[in-house]
Amino acid sequence: MTDTATDLLFDLTLTDEQRMNRESMQRFAAAEMRTLGKSVDAGDSPAQDFYPRTAELGLTLLPIPEALGGAGVERSPTSNALIFEDLAHGDMALALGSLSPMAFVNTLLDQGSDAQREQYLPLFCAGKFKAATTALLEPRATFEPTAPATTATLHGDGYSLSGTKSMVPLGMEAELLLVIARLESGDSAAFIIEGTPLGMTRTAEANMGLLGAQLATLTLDQVQLPASALLGGGAFDLQRFIDLSRIGICALAVGTCQAVLDYVTPYCNERVAFGEPISNRQSVAFMIADIAIELEAMRLMTWRAAARAEQGLDFHEHAYLAKLFCSEHAMKIGTDGVQLLGGHGFCREHPVELWYRNLRAIAILEGIASV
Amino acid sequence: MINLELAKKHQETFEQTMMLAEHMMRPYSRKYDKEEHTYPKEMEEVAKLIGGARSAATGGTREPIPAGTVVNGGNMGAVVGLFGLCWGDVGLFLGMPGSGLGNAAITAVGTPEQVKKYGGSYAAMCITEPGTGSDSANISTTAVADGDEWVLNGEKIYVTDGQRCDTLVVWATLDKSLGKAAIKSFIVEKGTPGCEVTRLEHKLGIRASDTAAISFNDCRIPKANVLGSAEIATDAEGRKKAFGGVMQTFDNTRPPVAAMAIGVSRAALDMSRELLKLEGVELKFDKKPVNLSAVEAELCQMEAEWHGARLLVLKAAWMADNKMPNSMEASMCKAKAGRVGNNITLRCVALCQSLGYSEKYLLEKFARDSKILDIFEGTQQIQQLIVARRVLDKSSSELK
């Protein structure tokens, strides 16, 4: 067993700030995201019209130091995980897009140099949505996030980047991108890219889900970057970045699965077959009980990894296992959500097929959603 | 503030029970598995040492908790202690004086006098009957008032520690035609005329723990030995409340049983990881699960399931410590830990192949011991029923 003794009590009570923040996130998610998310998925509304509206949530403003124009609230992985969960309850794709700039900001706060923080963070404090993102995944079966094939070679005073990044949230719009690559030494590094430099191509992706996140593929062909683009000016702790992202991805899964549970519960209570609600049958009721049970375990594992990160304890294994657990059970909950609605679940009139498609991504996503 | 690490005192409890488990329980695991029904006298020393943890399944203090205060108390201490002791041996734990679930009932619903007189005794629980298992509202053992006494008649089975306990908590009905509301529990001292152990079961696992059949033939006990009120509620609300009170004992006893599953499955995982390490298989938590070998992926998956189940147990116990109603959470953790504990121990046997199946190691024993934990204190399916009724807001007549 790997528990580390702390002086804190085991506690699942939210702080007052977290409780109040959750309320406003949940209100926003219900009012602004659920209906729109479906419409964006159907191609009826453009997602880029939505993102500016998230500025009111102050997602990026909070953790930025006051000296740089932010609110100076210490970055809290636990509070961030709660935000991811609550926004995903509205719509996972839009949540992912909304939180991409925060993931960029969090990583800059975590591993950037003072000069980089001073240069970029004030841009996120203007009260407007600033599209930014992080790019780690590469389009290859057996891809390992710790071993990106994108290379960064020394070139003159700076670096030359070549490779391909996939499933990059806000990939078409992002003005600031953090791209993960491998140095000639074999070490990992992260580079801040502004706009679309020569040699970089952005291609909108068509995927089975997550349309609202505006995922794109970035092709880098000898993209020249100044030495100052190297995050933190040296080696990048890629594992830490992956682990913090996994907590965010787990929280997205928790929020989406909660949405599934909240939807199938009244549906199965109202749907009548053989003269009574289908939820009077154990085969249906037990499936719902198991959704509730596994979802709670997903949540607790996510919270534990987040709280460990927040306390400065080692959290690699906890984030790894939470991601594994959430990947498995989120998909099971996704497929059970459709199953419980039967043929109706298969039709796009109901949102369960959308959640099914989005939840398939939980096992795949890496290096986005850093808390 | 959200923190899912154990408080320091509970981390210490855990470490102490792991020491006891390793040095004072494991050496006897195989012996008492082989010698079914033999009293494991060496466990008396362990029982003495855990002393406080004896209240394994008790609800802790009855004092109200001031607002804004967080308690990590007896319920959490009990499950954490059980993580360790049942890493040692579930059967030996269950066969240990003071581990009886009857103690939980007495502490939860007994009067101060009853708690004083019987709380420290070795109390076993008699609920199940030959014709009544999960439908415990259907029991037919009777209790009839006669002067200053109750007269009990009926047959009880699956009484854990029924042979070696001092006291029995017996569920009986005052009038079967009045249904659940007429079910009361009674304290019977062993040796009372008319109360007799008729048989000990031969079992798949937990062989160190005796499982008795006990018959009651005109067994007379004092009037004062009824737990809770002897009145039979007449209105619907009162009837529901009366039986609910009896059933509430389970909110306190389910997390501990779930904790036993956490302990035994941890034991199986630790042992399998050691044996696999000898063959060069080690978990590094580096590659993505889809890129792992099958055996590594299976181990990782089991680790993840184990952690998830463990946190559900801690949550249910934490809620009990903080006086939050935890019926649903108690059932959630019992359902999850019960099935995860059984799955893990069985998969570990398969992973280690001949070594897993052999009596040379304890893996096969863990796999036999774990099965009962998905059954007693309510089967997994009963737990699912309870969770489903709560989530779907249904009565027991709607969702049967």
Image (tube, helix red, strand yellow):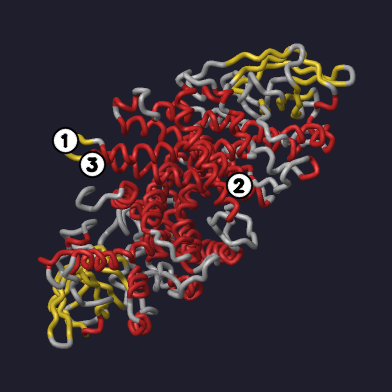
Res A274 label: 1
Chain bearing tag 1 is A
The first of marks 1 and 3 along the sequence is 1
Q: CA distance from mark 1 to mark 2?
A: 46 Å
Asked if labels 1 and 2 share a chain, the reply is yes
Disc 1 residue type (three-letter): Phe
Q: Residues within 10 Å of mark 3 (few under 14, many from 20)?
A: some
Residue drawn at point x = 76 percent, y = 38 percent: A111
Residue in the picture at 44% in, 43% down: A295
- Where disc 3 sits, the SS reads loop
What's the amino acid at mark 2? Ser
**Height in image: B82 above or below B364?**
below
Q: Residues within 10 Å of mark 2 (few under 14, many from 20)?
A: many
Q: Give the quadrant of residue A136.
A: top right
Q: Amino acid at mark 3?
A: Arg
Q: Mark number for residue A281? A: 3
Residue A323 is left or right of residue B133, and the answer is right
Q: In the rendered structure, which disc, 3 or 2, sits on the residue that comes first in sequence?
A: 2
Q: What residue is pinned by disc 2?
A: A79
Numbered tag placed on residue A93 in the rendering: none
On the question of residue B3 being in view, the answer is no
Which chain hosts label 2?
Answer: A
Position of B188 with respect to A260 (left or right) is left
Instruction: Locate residue B121: give its quadrant.
Output: bottom left
Q: Nearer the viewer, residue A350 or A152?
A: A350
Q: Of discs 3 and 2, which sits in the foreground?
A: 2
User: Which of the chains bears the disc numbered 3?
Assistant: A
